[in-house]
Amino acid sequence: MPQPQGADLEAVRARREDLKQKYLHPAGERPATPVRGVHHLALIARDVEKTIRFYQEFLGFPLVELVENRDYAGSSHFFFDIGNRNMLGFFDFPGHDHPDFTETIGGVQHLALSVSAEHYDSIRAKLDAEGVEYLGPDRGVEDSLYVRDPNGVGLEFYREELGVFEGETLVR
């Protein structure tokens, strides 16, 4: 993806600073959010079994439900436990052609999952042992590993506490 250069880059940075000044209120002045959290993120699976094997058997996320999609006959709706009472959900749509992943407006760029240092090391060793390609600490982001699931969904295993970004607590 082309990156802005020169004057375009400066304009982008100036716009970000304007937005920050206008909308980012100091922590003590922010209202409490009106929702309880993420119930589930719903994504589309190309192949139900490959998706289950990747998330449950490879990554260790327990499959907690597998039912027919209430809105689309024949489609499966299934969920994985990703911790803290949050779930990752998938639908499949049998008979539909699913194009390869593309990074576009409205698409999921990646899902960042908070992991302990021990689990980070374990995931990295497992990826290495299985020959799964990933982007990782060698590119200057020491606390992140990026991988794509069988559907093209980007996952980041982020060695950071929930509500914290680059060592700074953003949400309590």
Image (tube, rainbow, N blue to C red):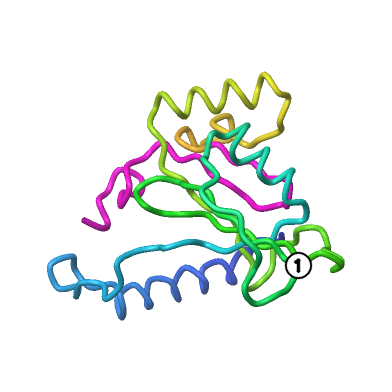
* Image quadrant where residue 76 sits: bottom right
Q: What residue is at 27 percent from the left and 56 percent from the top? A: 170
Q: Percent x, y for residue 21?
A: 30, 75
The magenta region covers 145-172
Q: Percent x, y for residue 138?
A: 58, 29
Compared with 171, 73 (above or below) is below
* Image quadrant where residue 52 sits: top right
Q: What's under tag 1, amino acid-wise?
A: Gly
Query: In the image, is residue 114 part of the stretch drawn in magenta?
Result: no
- Left of 59 or right of it: where is 52? right
Work out which residue is located at the far left of the displayed protein and give it. 28
Locate the N terminus and report the quarter of the image it occupies: bottom right
Q: What residue is at 70 percent from the left and 75 percent from the top? A: 72
- Left of 172 or right of it: where is 18? right
Residue with the mark numbered 1? 74
Locate the C terminus and report the quarter of the image it occupies: bottom left
Camera-nearest residue between 76 and 152: 76
Name the secondary structure under disc 1: loop
Q: Percent x, y for residue 85?
A: 36, 52
